[in-house]
């Protein structure tokens, strides 16, 4: 059985697209889906949070569906950390999707195969469904795989194992030592110059995120994330999320190009050529890219555009 956790709050329109594409996955009928619905922050949230819960209860296309309704608003970070803790207590392996992630029909297969292949590999922290679009555009012609290893945890559709997550220190008790250690900060930033500053913001109370803390745990374990060359996931919530408040299509990948039968790597190492492309895209100008990638997948699934 494939175990999936979906986290949602107050965006029923995006959740509908997330669940529609997830149900269109080839292995959806073999998946146990748990949908975590956060509670409203205030009275104005109630119509949308109610709509999200009703939508979750009507979800079909999976082996089973369970809906967890939060009585009160926990907030994005607390809701996800609590849900992950419970799901990993019950399951050794888990696939996680948030409510603004559209998936390729091959996403569950890709993540499931990655979970099986790297379960005992002490170098692999997680499998990500998303990758920056710049990778596929610039990947060297002689690169032999459909995945690459990177010292960073990407959370726009991902999968991991209990033993990677069960001992994460969400309070980051070692932060003061890290804060005052230039060598540690430099080493963490090998995955991107923004990582240490994001952890600083989290610990200073300027940010309330769970993923940077998970990435810090990956760093301390000296592990890597496995990313696809061609993305299996697309974030459609840019500009409307808790942490994605700026509307941009800079990060949009064409998930219709996702590979059905990917070539995985067994020798986990960072290819310096791809690493340079990866780091460069985080420094690039946030240009707008066309939304045709979203509409192309929409036509494949429903015969019409999901985004006008």
Image: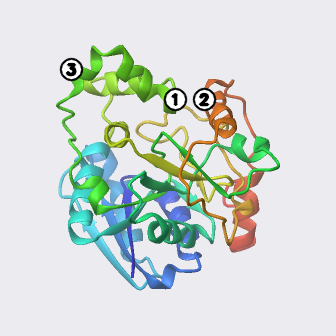
Q: Above or below — where is 19 with respect to 82?
A: below
Give the label, 1 or 2, closer to the camera: 1
Residue beneath disc 2: 282
> Which part of the image, by quadrant, shows the N terminus?
bottom left
| Residue 235 visible within the image | no
Which callout, 1 or 2, points at the residue further toward the start of the chain?
Answer: 1
Residue nearest the observer in this picture, 71 or 109: 109
Mark nearer the N terminus (2 vs 3): 3
Q: Whole-percent x and y of residue 41?
A: 26, 44
Most foreground residue, 70 or 199: 199
Q: Is residue 256 above or below residue 199?
A: below
Say if mark 1 contacts mark 2, CB within 8 Å.
yes
| Residue with the mark numbered 1 | 192
Res. 232 in view:
yes
User: Viewed as shown, does residue 178 lie left or right of 65?
Assistant: left
What is the crowding at mark 3: few (fewer than 14 residues within 10 Å), some, or many (at least 20)? few
Few, some or many residues within 10 Å of mark 1 (<14, 14–19, 20+): some
Distance of mark 3 from mark 1, alpha carbons? Answer: 21 Å
Whole-percent x, y for residue 86 in the image: 21, 63
Q: Secondary structure at mark 2?
A: helix
Q: Residue at x 60, y 59 (%)?
A: 265
Disc 1, SS: loop
Q: Are marks 2 and 3 in contact (CB under 8 Å)?
A: no
Q: Quadrant of residue 231?
A: bottom right
Quick one: label 2, few (<14), some, or many (20+) residues within 10 Å? some
Q: In the depicted view, which residue is nearer to us: 106 or 246?
A: 106
**What is the x, y in percent for residue 193?**
50, 23
**Earlier residue among tags 3 and 1:** 3
* Separation (CA) of disc 2 from disc 3: 26 Å
Residue that carries the numbered disc 3 in the rendered image: 176
**Quadrant in which residue 223 is drawn:** top left
Q: Secondary structure at mark 3?
A: helix
């Amino acid at each position: 059985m494939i175990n999936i956790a979906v986290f949602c709050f107050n965006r029923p329109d995006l959740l509908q697209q997330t669940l529609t594409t997830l149900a269109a996955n080839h292995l959806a009928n073999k998946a146990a889906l748990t949908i975590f619905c956060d509670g409203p922050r205030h009275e104005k949230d109630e119509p949308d949070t109610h709509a999200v819960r009703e939508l979750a209860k009507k979800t079909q296309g999976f082996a089973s569906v369970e809906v967890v309704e939060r009585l009160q608003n926990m907030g994005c970070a607390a809701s996800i950390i609590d849900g992950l803790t419970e799901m990993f207590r019950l399951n050794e392996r888990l696939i996680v999707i948030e409510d603004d992630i559209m998936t390729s029909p091959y996403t569950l297969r890709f993540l499931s195969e990655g979970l099986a292949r790297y379960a005992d590999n002490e170098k692999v922290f997680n499998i990500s469904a998303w990758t920056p679009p710049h990778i596929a555009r610039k990947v060297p012609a002689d690169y032999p795989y459909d995945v690459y290893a990177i010292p960073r945890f990407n959370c726009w559709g991902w999968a991991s194992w209990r033993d990677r997550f069960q001992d994460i220190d969400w309070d980051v008790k070692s932060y003061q030592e890290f804060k005052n250690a230039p060598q540690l900060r430099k080493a963490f930033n090998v995955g991107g110059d923004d990582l240490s500053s994001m952890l600083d913001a989290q610990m200073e109370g300027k940010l309330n995120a769970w993923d940077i803390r998970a990435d810090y745990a990956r760093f301390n374990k000296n592990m890597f994330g496995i990313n696809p060359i061609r993305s299996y996931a697309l974030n459609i919530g840019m500009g409307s999320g808790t942490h994605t408040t700026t509307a941009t299509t800079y990060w949009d990948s064409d998930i219709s190009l996702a590979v059905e039968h990917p070539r995985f790597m067994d020798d986990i190492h960072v290819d310096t050529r791809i690493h340079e492309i990866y780091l460069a895209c985080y420094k690039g100008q946030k240009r707008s890219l066309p939304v045709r990638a979203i509409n192309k997948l929409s036509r494949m699934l429903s015969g019409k555009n999901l985004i006008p």
